[in-house]
Amino acid sequence: NNGDGVDDVIVGASHWANSSGPGKAYVYFGSRFFMDGFDDRLFVGVTGGQLGKSVAGVGDMNGDGFEDVAVGEAGYGAPMYGRRALVYLGGPPADDQPHLTVTGSNMGDGVGSTVAAAGDTNNDGYPDLGIGAYAVNGKGAAIFMLGGDFLSPTPALVIGGGPLNQATGSS
């Protein structure tokens, strides 16, 4: 995340303050001598948003030489849970605003309930992102976003669930 060649760690705290709190995600920079326990970057969600319900290091999605992170905000748009996933770019200058936001179409569709590095699914040299949306159309979906010089908010692929209540995308 800071480009020093040492792996960093992201930790989610989706119920920070209380269960209807904004949620937070903390990034701790690694070092050759281990981490000091003080967060180096902090992302704060909206009230009731539960930012940090899912977190993942996703590699250098935009090719700028700095590792990026994805954070799910499971309560965004509460009272129905699961509405968006956010990508924060690494490197100086550190930015506390998301560079990419993927928002679900409907309240309660579960977008952002899980986020994960997806590898380089199209072999273009940029890592990609998988986003779980366990309740889309009552079946769930797995959403794939491509890395690249420009991070498009349009999914490259959405794999829908089968039978109702299958919860595709729940992990």
Image: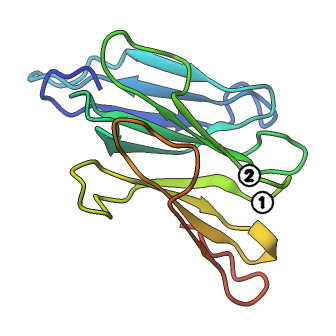
Instruction: Give the left or right position of residue 117, taking residue 115 as reference.
Output: left
Query: How busy is the neighbourhood of tag 2: few (under 14 within 10 Å), some, or many (20 plus)?
Result: some
Q: Which residue is mark 2?
A: 104
Residue at left offset 70%, top offset 37%: 50
Vertical position of residue 10 compared to residue 160: above or below: above
Q: Amino acid at mark 1?
A: Asp
Q: Where does the image place residue 35, in percent across and percent down from the top left? A: 24, 22
Residue 10, image x, y percentages: 40, 34
Q: Is residue 73 visible?
A: no
Q: Where does residue 70 sit, x and y in percent of width and height?
A: 47, 40
Mark 2 residue type: Gly
User: Residue 39 is drawn in which quadrant?
Assistant: top left
Q: Residues within 10 Å of mark 1 (few under 14, many from 20)?
A: many
Q: Residue at x 30, y 58 (%)?
A: 119
The x, y position of residue 85, in whole percent, is: 60, 44
Q: Name the secondary structure under disc 2.
A: loop
- What residue is rendered at 55% in x and 27% in y? 98
Which is more N-terminal, label 1 or label 2?
2
Q: Nearer the viewer, residue 150 or 121?
A: 150
Q: CA distance from mark 2 to mark 1?
A: 6 Å
Which residue is the site of mark 1? 109
Left or right: residue 71 versus residue 124 is right
Asked whether, in this view, residue 60 is left or right of residue 169, the answer is left
